[in-house]
Amino acid sequence: MDKEPIRVLLRNNKSPGNSPGDTLMLTAAVRDLHRSHPQRFRTAVETSCDDLWRYNPYVVPRWEEAPEYVVNCAYPLIHQSHRPFHFIHGFAQYLGWKLGVPIQVSDFKGDIHLSDEERRAASPLAAQEWHGPFWIIVAGGKFDFTAKWWNPASYQAVVDHFRGKIQFVQCGEKDHWHPPLKNVISLVGKTTIREFINLMHHADGVVCPVTFAMHLAAAVPLRPGQVSRACVVVAGGREPTHWEMYPGHQFLHTQGALPCCAAGGCWKSRCQPMHDSNPMDDDLCTNPISVTPELSIPKCMHLISPRRVIDAIELYYDGGTLSHASELTASQIC
Protein backbone atom coordinates (compact mmCIF):
# COMPACT_ATOMS: atom_id res chain seq x y z
CA MET A 1 0.00 0.00 0.00
CA ASP A 2 1.36 3.40 -0.91
CA LYS A 3 2.37 5.61 1.99
CA GLU A 4 0.46 8.78 2.71
CA PRO A 5 2.38 11.94 1.83
CA ILE A 6 4.35 13.45 4.69
CA ARG A 7 2.60 16.57 6.03
CA VAL A 8 4.97 19.52 6.13
CA LEU A 9 4.23 23.04 7.36
CA LEU A 10 6.68 25.70 6.22
CA ARG A 11 6.81 29.01 8.05
CA ASN A 12 8.42 32.29 7.07
CA ASN A 13 6.54 34.90 9.07
CA LYS A 14 8.40 38.16 9.03
CA SER A 15 6.49 41.42 9.36
CA PRO A 16 3.77 41.63 6.69
CA GLY A 17 4.90 43.42 3.57
CA ASN A 18 8.55 43.61 4.63
CA SER A 19 9.92 40.43 3.10
CA PRO A 20 8.17 39.50 -0.17
CA GLY A 21 11.58 38.77 -1.73
CA ASP A 22 12.28 36.11 0.89
CA THR A 23 8.89 34.49 0.36
CA LEU A 24 9.41 34.56 -3.40
CA MET A 25 12.66 32.63 -3.04
CA LEU A 26 10.88 30.14 -0.79
CA THR A 27 8.44 29.40 -3.63
CA ALA A 28 11.39 28.07 -5.64
CA ALA A 29 12.43 25.75 -2.81
CA VAL A 30 8.88 24.36 -2.50
CA ARG A 31 8.73 23.76 -6.25
CA ASP A 32 12.05 21.95 -6.22
CA LEU A 33 11.17 19.88 -3.15
CA HIS A 34 8.17 18.49 -5.02
CA ARG A 35 10.00 18.06 -8.30
CA SER A 36 12.79 16.19 -6.52
CA HIS A 37 10.37 14.01 -4.53
CA PRO A 38 7.03 13.74 -6.38
CA GLN A 39 4.04 12.82 -4.19
CA ARG A 40 6.24 12.31 -1.11
CA PHE A 41 5.23 15.51 0.68
CA ARG A 42 2.04 17.45 1.28
CA THR A 43 3.05 21.03 1.91
CA ALA A 44 1.26 23.92 3.57
CA VAL A 45 2.79 27.34 4.14
CA GLU A 46 2.51 30.22 6.60
CA THR A 47 4.15 33.39 5.28
CA SER A 48 3.49 37.11 5.27
CA CYS A 49 2.78 37.18 1.51
CA ASP A 50 -0.17 34.96 0.61
CA ASP A 51 -0.43 36.62 -2.82
CA LEU A 52 2.77 34.89 -3.88
CA TRP A 53 1.22 31.44 -3.36
CA ARG A 54 -2.02 31.87 -5.28
CA TYR A 55 -2.69 29.09 -7.81
CA ASN A 56 0.46 27.27 -6.69
CA PRO A 57 -0.01 23.54 -7.38
CA TYR A 58 2.61 22.51 -4.82
CA VAL A 59 0.91 23.88 -1.71
CA VAL A 60 -2.34 22.90 0.01
CA PRO A 61 -4.56 24.61 2.62
CA ARG A 62 -3.82 23.89 6.25
CA TRP A 63 -5.19 20.54 7.34
CA GLU A 64 -6.80 19.61 10.67
CA GLU A 65 -4.17 17.03 11.62
CA ALA A 66 -0.87 18.11 13.11
CA PRO A 67 1.95 18.33 10.57
CA GLU A 68 4.74 15.79 10.84
CA TYR A 69 7.33 18.49 10.17
CA VAL A 70 7.19 22.19 11.02
CA VAL A 71 10.08 24.10 9.48
CA ASN A 72 10.82 27.71 10.28
CA CYS A 73 12.47 28.43 6.97
CA ALA A 74 15.77 30.28 6.79
CA TYR A 75 18.72 30.58 4.44
CA PRO A 76 21.93 30.48 6.50
CA LEU A 77 23.82 30.02 3.24
CA ILE A 78 23.78 33.83 2.95
CA HIS A 79 26.51 33.89 5.58
CA GLN A 80 28.70 32.01 3.09
CA SER A 81 27.76 34.12 0.09
CA HIS A 82 31.41 34.30 -0.95
CA ARG A 83 30.95 30.71 -2.15
CA PRO A 84 29.60 30.08 -5.67
CA PHE A 85 25.90 29.86 -4.79
CA HIS A 86 22.86 31.96 -5.73
CA PHE A 87 20.11 33.11 -3.37
CA ILE A 88 17.88 30.47 -4.97
CA HIS A 89 19.99 27.77 -3.28
CA GLY A 90 19.49 29.21 0.22
CA PHE A 91 16.04 27.95 1.22
CA ALA A 92 16.41 24.74 -0.81
CA GLN A 93 19.60 23.77 0.96
CA TYR A 94 18.15 24.50 4.40
CA LEU A 95 14.83 22.77 3.70
CA GLY A 96 16.58 19.67 2.40
CA TRP A 97 18.70 19.54 5.54
CA LYS A 98 15.67 19.89 7.81
CA LEU A 99 13.66 17.21 5.97
CA GLY A 100 16.61 14.89 5.44
CA VAL A 101 16.25 14.75 1.66
CA PRO A 102 18.31 16.11 -1.23
CA ILE A 103 16.66 18.91 -3.19
CA GLN A 104 17.83 19.54 -6.73
CA VAL A 105 17.42 23.17 -7.78
CA SER A 106 15.70 23.29 -11.17
CA ASP A 107 14.47 26.52 -12.75
CA PHE A 108 16.66 29.58 -12.16
CA LYS A 109 13.80 31.71 -10.80
CA GLY A 110 11.05 31.89 -8.23
CA ASP A 111 7.79 30.07 -8.82
CA ILE A 112 4.85 32.37 -9.55
CA HIS A 113 1.63 31.04 -11.07
CA LEU A 114 -1.12 32.95 -12.87
CA SER A 115 -4.73 31.93 -13.30
CA ASP A 116 -6.21 31.61 -16.77
CA GLU A 117 -8.26 34.71 -16.02
CA GLU A 118 -5.14 36.69 -15.11
CA ARG A 119 -3.41 35.60 -18.30
CA ARG A 120 -6.39 36.75 -20.38
CA ALA A 121 -6.93 40.03 -18.53
CA ALA A 122 -5.97 43.39 -19.97
CA SER A 123 -3.00 45.23 -18.56
CA PRO A 124 -3.67 46.78 -15.12
CA LEU A 125 -2.70 50.08 -16.73
CA ALA A 126 -5.93 50.06 -18.74
CA ALA A 127 -7.50 51.74 -15.73
CA GLN A 128 -4.93 54.51 -16.20
CA GLU A 129 -5.97 54.76 -19.85
CA TRP A 130 -2.60 53.42 -20.97
CA HIS A 131 -2.71 50.54 -23.46
CA GLY A 132 0.83 50.54 -24.84
CA PRO A 133 4.08 48.88 -23.80
CA PHE A 134 5.77 50.00 -20.59
CA TRP A 135 8.66 49.46 -18.19
CA ILE A 136 8.42 49.35 -14.41
CA ILE A 137 10.84 51.59 -12.52
CA VAL A 138 11.56 51.30 -8.79
CA ALA A 139 13.52 54.41 -7.85
CA GLY A 140 13.91 53.96 -4.11
CA GLY A 141 13.81 51.33 -1.42
CA LYS A 142 13.41 50.47 2.23
CA PHE A 143 14.76 52.71 4.98
CA ASP A 144 16.63 49.83 6.62
CA PHE A 145 18.82 49.30 3.53
CA THR A 146 19.74 52.79 2.35
CA ALA A 147 22.97 51.39 0.91
CA LYS A 148 20.86 50.21 -2.03
CA TRP A 149 19.70 53.71 -2.97
CA TRP A 150 20.77 55.40 -6.21
CA ASN A 151 20.55 59.13 -6.89
CA PRO A 152 16.90 60.01 -7.77
CA ALA A 153 18.25 62.54 -10.27
CA SER A 154 19.93 59.67 -12.10
CA TYR A 155 16.67 57.74 -12.33
CA GLN A 156 15.04 60.90 -13.67
CA ALA A 157 17.76 61.28 -16.29
CA VAL A 158 17.01 57.75 -17.53
CA VAL A 159 13.28 58.48 -17.75
CA ASP A 160 13.91 61.76 -19.56
CA HIS A 161 16.22 60.13 -22.10
CA PHE A 162 13.51 57.70 -23.21
CA ARG A 163 10.61 60.15 -23.18
CA GLY A 164 8.55 59.49 -26.28
CA LYS A 165 9.98 55.97 -26.66
CA ILE A 166 9.40 54.15 -23.36
CA GLN A 167 6.61 54.74 -20.87
CA PHE A 168 7.83 54.15 -17.31
CA VAL A 169 5.55 53.20 -14.43
CA GLN A 170 6.95 54.05 -11.00
CA CYS A 171 6.14 51.48 -8.33
CA GLY A 172 6.97 50.91 -4.70
CA GLU A 173 5.61 50.52 -1.17
CA LYS A 174 3.95 53.63 0.19
CA ASP A 175 5.87 53.44 3.48
CA HIS A 176 9.26 53.14 1.79
CA TRP A 177 11.47 55.85 0.24
CA HIS A 178 10.35 56.56 -3.31
CA PRO A 179 11.04 60.15 -4.43
CA PRO A 180 8.46 60.99 -7.11
CA LEU A 181 9.69 61.04 -10.70
CA LYS A 182 8.37 63.28 -13.47
CA ASN A 183 6.92 62.02 -16.75
CA VAL A 184 5.95 58.62 -15.34
CA ILE A 185 2.71 56.88 -14.42
CA SER A 186 2.91 56.72 -10.62
CA LEU A 187 1.57 53.62 -8.89
CA VAL A 188 3.64 54.09 -5.73
CA GLY A 189 1.57 52.78 -2.85
CA LYS A 190 -1.28 51.85 -5.18
CA THR A 191 -0.74 48.14 -5.84
CA THR A 192 -1.13 45.02 -3.79
CA ILE A 193 1.49 42.34 -4.32
CA ARG A 194 -0.91 40.43 -6.59
CA GLU A 195 -1.62 43.57 -8.61
CA PHE A 196 2.13 44.13 -8.89
CA ILE A 197 2.53 40.56 -10.18
CA ASN A 198 -0.10 41.21 -12.85
CA LEU A 199 1.59 44.48 -13.76
CA MET A 200 4.91 42.65 -14.07
CA HIS A 201 3.28 40.09 -16.38
CA HIS A 202 2.50 42.88 -18.85
CA ALA A 203 5.77 44.81 -18.48
CA ASP A 204 8.46 44.79 -21.16
CA GLY A 205 11.14 45.47 -18.60
CA VAL A 206 12.17 46.69 -15.18
CA VAL A 207 14.71 49.19 -13.84
CA CYS A 208 15.43 48.78 -10.13
CA PRO A 209 18.07 48.20 -7.47
CA VAL A 210 18.57 44.77 -5.91
CA THR A 211 15.05 44.31 -4.56
CA PHE A 212 11.82 42.32 -4.81
CA ALA A 213 11.06 43.67 -8.30
CA MET A 214 14.29 42.17 -9.63
CA HIS A 215 13.41 38.70 -8.31
CA LEU A 216 9.82 39.06 -9.53
CA ALA A 217 10.98 40.05 -13.02
CA ALA A 218 12.56 36.61 -13.33
CA ALA A 219 9.72 34.68 -11.67
CA VAL A 220 6.53 35.96 -13.34
CA PRO A 221 5.49 34.01 -16.46
CA LEU A 222 6.02 35.72 -19.81
CA ARG A 223 3.21 36.78 -22.10
CA PRO A 224 2.61 34.75 -25.28
CA GLY A 225 5.26 35.74 -27.80
CA GLN A 226 7.42 37.51 -25.22
CA VAL A 227 11.02 36.32 -25.59
CA SER A 228 12.23 37.58 -22.22
CA ARG A 229 11.49 40.23 -19.64
CA ALA A 230 14.23 42.83 -19.63
CA CYS A 231 15.64 43.85 -16.27
CA VAL A 232 18.34 46.43 -15.58
CA VAL A 233 19.58 46.28 -12.00
CA VAL A 234 21.48 49.19 -10.46
CA ALA A 235 23.43 46.97 -8.09
CA GLY A 236 26.66 48.71 -7.06
CA GLY A 237 28.87 46.71 -4.71
CA ARG A 238 26.69 45.61 -1.80
CA GLU A 239 25.73 42.06 -2.82
CA PRO A 240 27.98 39.51 -4.55
CA THR A 241 26.94 39.38 -8.19
CA HIS A 242 26.66 35.59 -8.27
CA TRP A 243 24.32 35.64 -5.26
CA GLU A 244 21.76 37.94 -6.92
CA MET A 245 22.06 38.03 -10.72
CA TYR A 246 19.62 36.19 -12.99
CA PRO A 247 20.19 35.06 -16.59
CA GLY A 248 19.08 37.70 -19.06
CA HIS A 249 19.40 40.58 -16.59
CA GLN A 250 21.79 43.50 -17.00
CA PHE A 251 23.30 43.54 -13.51
CA LEU A 252 25.24 46.80 -13.24
CA HIS A 253 27.81 46.37 -10.52
CA THR A 254 31.07 48.01 -9.49
CA GLN A 255 32.66 45.13 -7.61
CA GLY A 256 36.39 44.97 -8.04
CA ALA A 257 36.59 48.72 -8.65
CA LEU A 258 36.64 49.82 -5.01
CA PRO A 259 38.72 48.43 -2.13
CA CYS A 260 35.56 47.97 0.00
CA CYS A 261 34.06 45.49 -2.48
CA ALA A 262 37.17 44.34 -4.33
CA ALA A 263 36.52 40.67 -3.58
CA GLY A 264 32.70 40.73 -3.58
CA GLY A 265 29.81 42.42 -1.82
CA CYS A 266 30.38 44.47 1.32
CA TRP A 267 26.86 43.75 2.69
CA LYS A 268 26.70 47.15 4.42
CA SER A 269 23.15 48.09 5.41
CA ARG A 270 23.08 51.87 5.30
CA CYS A 271 24.90 54.79 3.79
CA GLN A 272 23.62 57.35 6.25
CA PRO A 273 22.19 56.89 9.74
CA MET A 274 18.43 56.99 10.21
CA HIS A 275 18.70 57.68 13.96
CA ASP A 276 15.95 55.14 14.58
CA SER A 277 17.72 53.01 17.24
CA ASN A 278 18.22 50.27 14.64
CA PRO A 279 21.57 48.42 14.88
CA MET A 280 21.87 48.95 11.13
CA ASP A 281 22.87 52.52 11.97
CA ASP A 282 26.18 51.03 13.08
CA ASP A 283 26.70 49.25 9.76
CA LEU A 284 27.42 52.21 7.50
CA CYS A 285 28.97 52.44 4.04
CA THR A 286 32.66 53.34 4.24
CA ASN A 287 32.61 55.37 1.00
CA PRO A 288 29.58 57.69 1.09
CA ILE A 289 29.10 60.34 -1.58
CA SER A 290 26.94 63.38 -0.87
CA VAL A 291 24.69 63.95 -3.90
CA THR A 292 22.45 66.54 -2.22
CA PRO A 293 22.61 68.24 1.18
CA GLU A 294 20.06 65.69 2.42
CA LEU A 295 21.23 62.54 0.65
CA SER A 296 24.37 60.44 0.57
CA ILE A 297 24.66 57.28 -1.50
CA PRO A 298 27.46 54.70 -1.66
CA LYS A 299 30.33 55.45 -4.02
CA CYS A 300 29.74 52.03 -5.62
CA MET A 301 26.28 53.28 -6.66
CA HIS A 302 27.45 56.78 -7.57
CA LEU A 303 29.94 55.29 -10.05
CA ILE A 304 27.03 53.88 -12.07
CA SER A 305 26.08 56.68 -14.44
CA PRO A 306 22.67 57.26 -16.03
CA ARG A 307 24.39 56.64 -19.37
CA ARG A 308 25.32 53.13 -18.26
CA VAL A 309 21.70 52.36 -17.39
CA ILE A 310 20.49 53.89 -20.65
CA ASP A 311 22.94 51.75 -22.62
CA ALA A 312 21.80 48.64 -20.75
CA ILE A 313 18.16 49.36 -21.62
CA GLU A 314 19.00 50.07 -25.26
CA LEU A 315 20.92 46.79 -25.46
CA TYR A 316 17.63 44.86 -25.37
CA TYR A 317 16.35 46.85 -28.36
CA ASP A 318 19.64 46.73 -30.25
CA GLY A 319 19.81 42.97 -29.72
CA GLY A 320 16.24 42.37 -30.84
CA THR A 321 14.52 40.86 -27.80
CA LEU A 322 12.52 44.11 -27.61
CA SER A 323 11.39 46.55 -30.24
CA HIS A 324 9.84 50.00 -30.17
CA ALA A 325 6.47 49.35 -31.81
CA SER A 326 6.21 53.01 -32.66
CA GLU A 327 7.09 56.40 -31.31
CA LEU A 328 4.65 57.51 -28.64
CA THR A 329 2.37 60.27 -29.78
CA ALA A 330 2.30 63.59 -27.97
CA SER A 331 -1.03 62.70 -26.36
CA GLN A 332 0.44 59.47 -24.99
CA ILE A 333 3.50 60.97 -23.37
CA CYS A 334 3.07 61.39 -19.62
Image: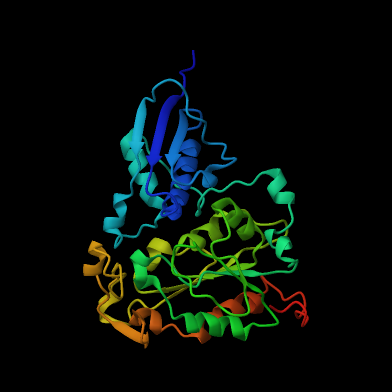
Residue 239 seen in the current view:
no
The answer to which image quadrant residue 158 occupies is bottom right
Residue beneath the point at 43% across and 77% down: 150
Q: Is residue 241 above or below residue 53?
A: below
Q: Nearer the viewer, residue 153 or 206?
A: 153
Q: Nearer the viewer, residue 74 or 333?
A: 333
Percent from the top left, x then y, of residue 56? 56, 40
165 relative position to 83: left or right: right
Q: Is residue 219 above or below residue 42?
A: below
Q: Which corner quadrant holds the C terminus? A: bottom right
Percent from the top left, x then y, of residue 156? 54, 82
Q: Nearer the viewer, residue 100 or 45?
A: 45
Percent from the top left, x then y, of residue 80? 27, 57
Q: How is the image coloured?
A: rainbow
Q: Is residue 183 above or below residue 249?
A: below
Residue beneath the point at 64% across and 82% down: 162
> How many dots with numbers?
0
121 relative position to 300: left or right: right
Q: Nearer the viewer, residue 72 or 173?
A: 173
Q: Is residue 162 above or below residue 59?
A: below
Percent from the top left, x then y, of residue 215? 49, 59
The answer to which image quadrant residue 287 occupies is bottom left
156 relative position to 327: left or right: left
Residue 177 seen in the current view:
yes
